[in-house]
Image (cartoon, grey):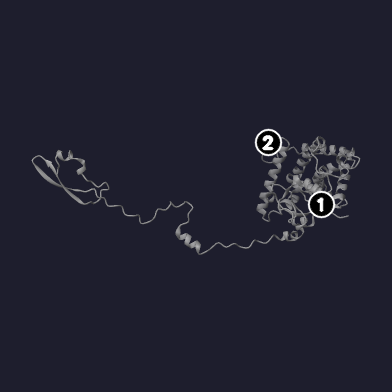
Amino acid sequence: MQLPAAFWTHPPELLHFDRWGRRCQHRTFRIPYTSSTATVTMASATATPPKPSARPNQPAPSLWSIPAPLQKLFNQFPLVTLDPNPLPARSQTLTSASDTLPTLYIFSSDEDALEGKPSINPTCLKWQTLLRLSHVPFLTSPSSNHASPTGSLPFLLPPRTVSPNPIPSTSIPLYISRHTNSPSPLPTSPRSEAYLSLLTPLRLAFLQTLYLTPAFTPLLKKFYIDPSTRSSVLGTILQTQLSAAASSAVLQGLGLHSQTGTGGIDSENLYADAAEALDSLAILLQESQTGWFFGEEKPGEFDAGLYGYVGVIMAHMDTPEGRLGGLVRRAGGGGGELVGWWERIRREAWGGDGLSEGGEK
Protein backbone atom coordinates (compact mmCIF):
# COMPACT_ATOMS: atom_id res chain seq x y z
CA MET A 1 0.00 0.00 0.00
CA GLN A 2 1.07 3.61 -0.47
CA LEU A 3 1.72 5.36 2.83
CA PRO A 4 0.71 8.99 3.30
CA ALA A 5 3.15 11.81 3.90
CA ALA A 6 2.38 11.74 7.63
CA PHE A 7 4.09 8.37 7.84
CA TRP A 8 7.47 9.80 6.82
CA THR A 9 7.18 12.64 9.37
CA HIS A 10 6.55 10.16 12.19
CA PRO A 11 9.22 10.12 14.93
CA PRO A 12 12.12 7.87 13.77
CA GLU A 13 12.30 6.02 17.11
CA LEU A 14 9.12 4.19 16.15
CA LEU A 15 10.73 2.78 13.01
CA HIS A 16 12.59 -0.30 14.26
CA PHE A 17 14.35 -1.70 11.20
CA ASP A 18 16.87 -4.51 11.40
CA ARG A 19 20.20 -3.18 10.12
CA TRP A 20 21.14 -6.65 8.94
CA GLY A 21 17.90 -7.05 7.04
CA ARG A 22 17.01 -10.17 8.99
CA ARG A 23 13.73 -11.50 10.36
CA CYS A 24 12.84 -9.86 13.69
CA GLN A 25 10.01 -9.92 16.24
CA HIS A 26 6.96 -7.92 15.27
CA ARG A 27 5.64 -4.76 16.88
CA THR A 28 2.30 -3.01 16.22
CA PHE A 29 1.85 0.74 16.41
CA ARG A 30 -0.47 3.34 14.95
CA ILE A 31 0.32 5.97 12.39
CA PRO A 32 -2.25 8.82 12.05
CA TYR A 33 -3.21 9.98 8.60
CA THR A 34 -6.20 11.98 7.27
CA SER A 35 -9.30 10.82 9.16
CA SER A 36 -8.51 7.34 10.39
CA THR A 37 -5.69 5.21 11.71
CA ALA A 38 -4.01 2.30 10.03
CA THR A 39 -2.30 -0.54 11.69
CA VAL A 40 1.14 -1.21 10.32
CA THR A 41 3.22 -4.13 11.36
CA MET A 42 6.98 -3.40 11.38
CA ALA A 43 10.05 -5.41 12.36
CA SER A 44 11.51 -4.71 15.75
CA ALA A 45 15.18 -3.92 16.26
CA THR A 46 15.91 -7.21 17.94
CA ALA A 47 18.76 -8.64 15.80
CA THR A 48 19.73 -12.26 15.45
CA PRO A 49 23.39 -12.64 16.36
CA PRO A 50 25.63 -13.91 13.54
CA LYS A 51 26.43 -17.57 13.54
CA PRO A 52 29.93 -18.51 14.58
CA SER A 53 32.33 -19.36 11.76
CA ALA A 54 32.60 -23.03 11.03
CA ARG A 55 36.47 -22.81 10.85
CA PRO A 56 38.75 -20.75 13.11
CA ASN A 57 40.63 -17.87 11.56
CA GLN A 58 43.81 -19.10 9.82
CA PRO A 59 46.51 -17.16 7.98
CA ALA A 60 46.40 -17.21 4.24
CA PRO A 61 48.38 -20.13 2.80
CA SER A 62 51.90 -19.29 1.68
CA LEU A 63 52.92 -19.48 -1.94
CA TRP A 64 55.43 -22.19 -1.02
CA SER A 65 53.16 -24.21 1.27
CA ILE A 66 52.66 -27.84 0.34
CA PRO A 67 49.06 -28.95 -0.29
CA ALA A 68 47.70 -31.31 2.31
CA PRO A 69 47.46 -34.35 -0.03
CA LEU A 70 51.10 -33.98 -1.04
CA GLN A 71 52.13 -33.46 2.57
CA LYS A 72 50.49 -36.76 3.50
CA LEU A 73 52.28 -38.43 0.61
CA PHE A 74 55.66 -37.03 1.64
CA ASN A 75 55.10 -38.16 5.20
CA GLN A 76 55.06 -41.72 3.91
CA PHE A 77 58.62 -41.27 2.59
CA PRO A 78 60.74 -39.56 5.27
CA LEU A 79 64.09 -37.91 4.46
CA VAL A 80 67.01 -40.32 4.56
CA THR A 81 70.64 -39.18 4.78
CA LEU A 82 72.87 -41.41 2.68
CA ASP A 83 76.46 -42.24 3.50
CA PRO A 84 79.06 -39.92 1.88
CA ASN A 85 80.59 -41.00 -1.39
CA PRO A 86 84.09 -42.43 -1.17
CA LEU A 87 87.06 -40.32 -2.23
CA PRO A 88 88.21 -40.58 -5.86
CA ALA A 89 90.65 -43.38 -6.54
CA ARG A 90 93.57 -41.02 -7.01
CA SER A 91 92.95 -39.50 -3.57
CA GLN A 92 93.39 -42.82 -1.79
CA THR A 93 97.14 -42.59 -2.24
CA LEU A 94 97.14 -39.13 -0.65
CA THR A 95 95.06 -40.03 2.37
CA SER A 96 97.80 -41.14 4.73
CA ALA A 97 100.63 -38.96 3.39
CA SER A 98 98.55 -35.81 3.23
CA ASP A 99 98.03 -36.01 6.98
CA THR A 100 101.62 -34.82 7.40
CA LEU A 101 102.52 -33.26 4.02
CA PRO A 102 100.98 -30.33 2.11
CA THR A 103 99.47 -30.96 -1.30
CA LEU A 104 100.03 -28.70 -4.30
CA TYR A 105 97.15 -28.80 -6.78
CA ILE A 106 98.34 -28.26 -10.34
CA PHE A 107 97.57 -28.81 -14.00
CA SER A 108 98.73 -32.37 -14.56
CA SER A 109 97.62 -35.87 -15.45
CA ASP A 110 96.84 -38.38 -12.74
CA GLU A 111 99.96 -40.40 -13.48
CA ASP A 112 102.34 -37.43 -13.63
CA ALA A 113 100.94 -35.92 -10.44
CA LEU A 114 101.28 -39.21 -8.61
CA GLU A 115 104.95 -39.39 -9.62
CA GLY A 116 105.54 -35.71 -8.85
CA LYS A 117 106.55 -34.82 -12.40
CA PRO A 118 106.75 -31.19 -13.55
CA SER A 119 103.57 -29.53 -14.72
CA ILE A 120 103.32 -28.24 -18.27
CA ASN A 121 101.68 -25.06 -16.97
CA PRO A 122 104.34 -22.34 -16.41
CA THR A 123 102.68 -20.91 -13.29
CA CYS A 124 102.26 -24.32 -11.69
CA LEU A 125 105.81 -25.29 -12.61
CA LYS A 126 107.11 -22.07 -11.02
CA TRP A 127 105.72 -22.92 -7.60
CA GLN A 128 106.60 -26.59 -7.92
CA THR A 129 110.18 -25.58 -8.57
CA LEU A 130 110.33 -23.01 -5.77
CA LEU A 131 109.06 -25.54 -3.22
CA ARG A 132 111.67 -28.04 -4.39
CA LEU A 133 114.45 -25.46 -4.33
CA SER A 134 113.42 -24.61 -0.76
CA HIS A 135 113.50 -28.32 0.21
CA VAL A 136 109.88 -28.30 1.36
CA PRO A 137 108.41 -31.81 0.97
CA PHE A 138 104.98 -31.84 -0.65
CA LEU A 139 102.59 -33.92 -2.71
CA THR A 140 101.03 -33.01 -6.05
CA SER A 141 97.49 -33.64 -7.21
CA PRO A 142 95.77 -32.84 -10.53
CA SER A 143 93.10 -30.18 -10.45
CA SER A 144 91.48 -27.41 -12.49
CA ASN A 145 90.73 -23.72 -12.14
CA HIS A 146 87.12 -24.54 -11.23
CA ALA A 147 88.29 -26.38 -8.09
CA SER A 148 90.60 -23.59 -6.96
CA PRO A 149 89.41 -21.23 -4.19
CA THR A 150 90.94 -18.30 -6.10
CA GLY A 151 89.79 -19.45 -9.53
CA SER A 152 93.30 -20.30 -10.75
CA LEU A 153 95.99 -22.89 -10.15
CA PRO A 154 98.06 -23.73 -8.29
CA PHE A 155 97.04 -23.64 -4.64
CA LEU A 156 98.57 -25.37 -1.65
CA LEU A 157 96.55 -27.36 0.86
CA PRO A 158 98.34 -27.71 4.23
CA PRO A 159 98.48 -31.08 6.01
CA ARG A 160 95.05 -32.20 7.12
CA THR A 161 96.15 -32.33 10.73
CA VAL A 162 97.25 -28.67 10.62
CA SER A 163 94.68 -26.57 8.77
CA PRO A 164 91.92 -27.14 6.23
CA ASN A 165 92.33 -23.68 4.70
CA PRO A 166 93.94 -23.60 1.24
CA ILE A 167 96.87 -21.30 0.55
CA PRO A 168 96.85 -19.28 -2.71
CA SER A 169 100.02 -19.21 -4.79
CA THR A 170 100.83 -15.64 -3.76
CA SER A 171 101.19 -16.81 -0.14
CA ILE A 172 103.45 -19.79 -0.88
CA PRO A 173 106.68 -17.78 -0.22
CA LEU A 174 105.39 -16.94 3.25
CA TYR A 175 104.56 -20.62 3.83
CA ILE A 176 108.10 -21.55 2.78
CA SER A 177 109.68 -19.03 5.14
CA ARG A 178 107.63 -20.36 8.06
CA HIS A 179 108.60 -23.99 7.42
CA THR A 180 112.27 -23.52 6.55
CA ASN A 181 115.21 -21.43 7.68
CA SER A 182 114.65 -19.04 4.80
CA PRO A 183 114.14 -15.37 5.66
CA SER A 184 110.75 -13.83 5.20
CA PRO A 185 110.07 -12.75 1.60
CA LEU A 186 111.03 -9.14 0.95
CA PRO A 187 109.03 -6.70 -1.16
CA THR A 188 109.94 -6.77 -4.83
CA SER A 189 112.70 -4.28 -5.60
CA PRO A 190 112.27 -1.81 -8.48
CA ARG A 191 115.08 -3.56 -10.39
CA SER A 192 113.55 -7.01 -10.14
CA GLU A 193 110.14 -5.49 -10.95
CA ALA A 194 111.59 -4.13 -14.19
CA TYR A 195 113.01 -7.51 -15.15
CA LEU A 196 109.75 -9.24 -14.24
CA SER A 197 108.13 -7.27 -17.04
CA LEU A 198 110.40 -9.17 -19.46
CA LEU A 199 108.39 -12.32 -18.74
CA THR A 200 105.34 -10.79 -20.45
CA PRO A 201 106.68 -11.10 -24.05
CA LEU A 202 107.79 -14.63 -23.22
CA ARG A 203 104.33 -15.47 -21.92
CA LEU A 204 102.62 -14.12 -25.06
CA ALA A 205 104.94 -16.12 -27.31
CA PHE A 206 104.28 -19.20 -25.19
CA LEU A 207 100.50 -18.79 -25.60
CA GLN A 208 100.94 -18.31 -29.35
CA THR A 209 102.99 -21.49 -29.59
CA LEU A 210 100.91 -23.85 -27.45
CA TYR A 211 97.37 -22.70 -28.22
CA LEU A 212 97.53 -21.13 -31.66
CA THR A 213 100.17 -23.16 -33.51
CA PRO A 214 98.67 -26.24 -35.22
CA ALA A 215 101.91 -28.25 -34.78
CA PHE A 216 101.37 -28.20 -31.00
CA THR A 217 97.71 -29.20 -31.00
CA PRO A 218 98.60 -32.80 -29.95
CA LEU A 219 100.50 -31.38 -26.96
CA LEU A 220 97.54 -29.16 -26.07
CA LYS A 221 95.16 -32.12 -26.23
CA LYS A 222 97.43 -34.36 -24.18
CA PHE A 223 97.86 -32.02 -21.22
CA TYR A 224 94.77 -29.78 -21.23
CA ILE A 225 91.91 -31.36 -23.16
CA ASP A 226 92.14 -35.14 -22.73
CA PRO A 227 92.35 -34.97 -18.90
CA SER A 228 89.12 -32.93 -18.91
CA THR A 229 86.88 -35.00 -21.20
CA ARG A 230 86.82 -38.21 -23.23
CA SER A 231 84.17 -36.91 -25.62
CA SER A 232 85.51 -35.84 -29.00
CA VAL A 233 82.69 -33.33 -29.39
CA LEU A 234 83.32 -31.72 -26.00
CA GLY A 235 87.04 -31.87 -26.67
CA THR A 236 86.61 -29.87 -29.86
CA ILE A 237 84.48 -27.30 -28.06
CA LEU A 238 87.03 -27.02 -25.25
CA GLN A 239 89.89 -26.61 -27.70
CA THR A 240 88.01 -23.82 -29.46
CA GLN A 241 87.38 -22.05 -26.16
CA LEU A 242 91.02 -22.37 -25.09
CA SER A 243 92.27 -21.05 -28.42
CA ALA A 244 89.85 -18.11 -28.29
CA ALA A 245 90.91 -17.27 -24.73
CA ALA A 246 94.60 -17.46 -25.68
CA SER A 247 94.05 -15.26 -28.73
CA SER A 248 92.24 -12.68 -26.61
CA ALA A 249 95.03 -12.74 -24.00
CA VAL A 250 97.71 -12.24 -26.66
CA LEU A 251 95.84 -9.37 -28.27
CA GLN A 252 95.31 -7.67 -24.91
CA GLY A 253 98.97 -8.19 -24.07
CA LEU A 254 99.90 -6.45 -27.30
CA GLY A 255 97.54 -3.58 -26.51
CA LEU A 256 95.11 -4.54 -29.26
CA HIS A 257 91.36 -4.97 -29.06
CA SER A 258 90.10 -8.52 -28.74
CA GLN A 259 88.69 -9.95 -31.94
CA THR A 260 87.64 -13.28 -33.35
CA GLY A 261 90.44 -15.43 -34.76
CA THR A 262 94.16 -14.74 -34.88
CA GLY A 263 94.24 -12.35 -37.82
CA GLY A 264 95.22 -9.42 -35.61
CA ILE A 265 98.31 -11.17 -34.19
CA ASP A 266 101.66 -10.52 -35.86
CA SER A 267 103.53 -13.67 -34.86
CA GLU A 268 106.86 -12.39 -36.25
CA ASN A 269 106.80 -9.34 -34.00
CA LEU A 270 105.62 -11.53 -31.15
CA TYR A 271 108.65 -13.84 -31.38
CA ALA A 272 110.96 -10.87 -31.95
CA ASP A 273 109.80 -9.34 -28.65
CA ALA A 274 110.36 -12.67 -26.90
CA ALA A 275 113.88 -12.93 -28.35
CA GLU A 276 114.72 -9.42 -27.14
CA ALA A 277 113.45 -10.26 -23.64
CA LEU A 278 115.51 -13.46 -23.52
CA ASP A 279 118.61 -11.57 -24.66
CA SER A 280 118.19 -9.09 -21.80
CA LEU A 281 117.79 -11.93 -19.29
CA ALA A 282 120.90 -13.68 -20.62
CA ILE A 283 122.94 -10.47 -20.27
CA LEU A 284 121.69 -10.11 -16.69
CA LEU A 285 122.99 -13.61 -15.95
CA GLN A 286 126.37 -12.74 -17.46
CA GLU A 287 126.71 -9.97 -14.88
CA SER A 288 126.00 -12.34 -11.98
CA GLN A 289 128.95 -13.86 -10.11
CA THR A 290 126.85 -16.66 -8.60
CA GLY A 291 125.07 -17.99 -11.68
CA TRP A 292 121.69 -16.94 -10.29
CA PHE A 293 119.71 -13.81 -11.06
CA PHE A 294 120.61 -10.61 -9.19
CA GLY A 295 123.72 -12.26 -7.73
CA GLU A 296 121.77 -14.25 -5.16
CA GLU A 297 123.53 -17.08 -3.36
CA LYS A 298 120.77 -19.51 -4.32
CA PRO A 299 117.92 -19.45 -6.84
CA GLY A 300 114.84 -17.56 -5.70
CA GLU A 301 111.35 -16.73 -6.84
CA PHE A 302 112.51 -14.89 -9.97
CA ASP A 303 114.57 -17.91 -11.05
CA ALA A 304 111.60 -20.19 -10.43
CA GLY A 305 109.27 -17.89 -12.38
CA LEU A 306 111.51 -17.85 -15.45
CA TYR A 307 112.08 -21.59 -15.17
CA GLY A 308 108.31 -22.07 -15.35
CA TYR A 309 108.51 -20.99 -18.99
CA VAL A 310 111.99 -22.15 -19.96
CA GLY A 311 111.47 -25.57 -18.38
CA VAL A 312 108.33 -26.25 -20.45
CA ILE A 313 109.89 -24.76 -23.61
CA MET A 314 113.04 -26.87 -23.44
CA ALA A 315 111.13 -30.05 -22.56
CA HIS A 316 108.27 -29.80 -25.07
CA MET A 317 108.85 -26.94 -27.53
CA ASP A 318 112.51 -27.19 -28.49
CA THR A 319 111.59 -27.91 -32.10
CA PRO A 320 111.78 -25.96 -35.37
CA GLU A 321 108.00 -25.51 -35.29
CA GLY A 322 108.07 -24.02 -31.82
CA ARG A 323 110.92 -21.56 -32.37
CA LEU A 324 111.04 -20.75 -28.66
CA GLY A 325 113.61 -23.45 -27.93
CA GLY A 326 115.95 -21.90 -30.49
CA LEU A 327 115.41 -18.45 -28.99
CA VAL A 328 116.48 -19.75 -25.56
CA ARG A 329 119.62 -21.38 -27.00
CA ARG A 330 120.61 -18.25 -28.96
CA ALA A 331 119.84 -15.78 -26.16
CA GLY A 332 122.68 -13.40 -25.30
CA GLY A 333 124.55 -14.00 -28.53
CA GLY A 334 124.55 -17.78 -28.29
CA GLY A 335 126.77 -17.90 -25.21
CA GLY A 336 124.54 -20.50 -23.59
CA GLU A 337 123.87 -18.53 -20.40
CA LEU A 338 120.20 -19.41 -20.24
CA VAL A 339 120.78 -23.03 -21.22
CA GLY A 340 123.43 -23.43 -18.51
CA TRP A 341 121.17 -21.73 -16.00
CA TRP A 342 118.30 -24.06 -16.99
CA GLU A 343 120.45 -27.12 -16.43
CA ARG A 344 121.57 -25.89 -13.00
CA ILE A 345 117.97 -25.32 -11.94
CA ARG A 346 117.11 -28.84 -13.08
CA ARG A 347 119.88 -30.36 -11.03
CA GLU A 348 119.05 -28.29 -7.98
CA ALA A 349 115.27 -28.76 -8.06
CA TRP A 350 114.55 -31.90 -10.05
CA GLY A 351 117.72 -33.96 -9.86
CA GLY A 352 117.79 -34.13 -13.64
CA ASP A 353 120.81 -33.95 -15.92
CA GLY A 354 119.31 -31.33 -18.19
CA LEU A 355 118.42 -33.75 -20.96
CA SER A 356 115.03 -35.18 -20.04
CA GLU A 357 112.26 -33.42 -18.12
CA GLY A 358 111.94 -34.83 -14.63
CA GLY A 359 114.57 -37.49 -15.30
CA GLU A 360 116.87 -38.76 -12.63
CA LYS A 361 120.60 -38.65 -12.97
**Is residue 213 shown to the viewer in this render?**
no
Residue 244 image point, x, y percent: 68, 43
Task: Please give the label number shown on residue 255.
Answer: none
**Is residue 308 shown to the viewer in this render?**
yes
Mark 1 = which residue? Answer: 136
207 or 20, which is in the foreground? 20
Name the kind of residue labelled 2 in the image. His
The quadrant in which residue 256 appears is top right
Residue lying farthest to the right in this orientation: 289
Q: On the picture, is 277 further left or further right than 152?
A: right
Mark 2 = which residue? Answer: 257
**Which quarter of the rendered picture does the C terminus lie within?**
bottom right
Q: Circle 1 — which element?
A: loop
Q: On the picture, is 145 further left or further right than 21?
A: right
20 or 103, which is in the foreground? 20
Separation (CA) of disc 2 from disc 1: 43 Å
162 or 98, which is in the foreground? 162
Which tag, 2 or 1, sits closer to the chain's start?
Answer: 1
The quadrant in which residue 87 appears is bottom right
Residue 287 image point, x, y percent: 90, 37
The structure residue drawn at horizontal position 77% and vertical position 59%, both measured from the top left corner, is 97
Q: Circle 2 — which element?
A: loop
The structure residue drawn at horizontal position 86% and vertical position 39%, both measured from the top left corner, is 294
**Which quarter of the rendered picture does the N terminus lie within?**
top left
Number of callouts? 2
Name the kind of residue labelled 1 in the image. Val
Residue 300 image point, x, y percent: 83, 44
The structure residue drawn at horizontal position 12% and vertical position 45%, both measured from the top left corner, is 38
Q: Are marks 2 and 1 in contact (CB under 8 Å)?
A: no
Residue lying farthest to the left in this orientation: 35
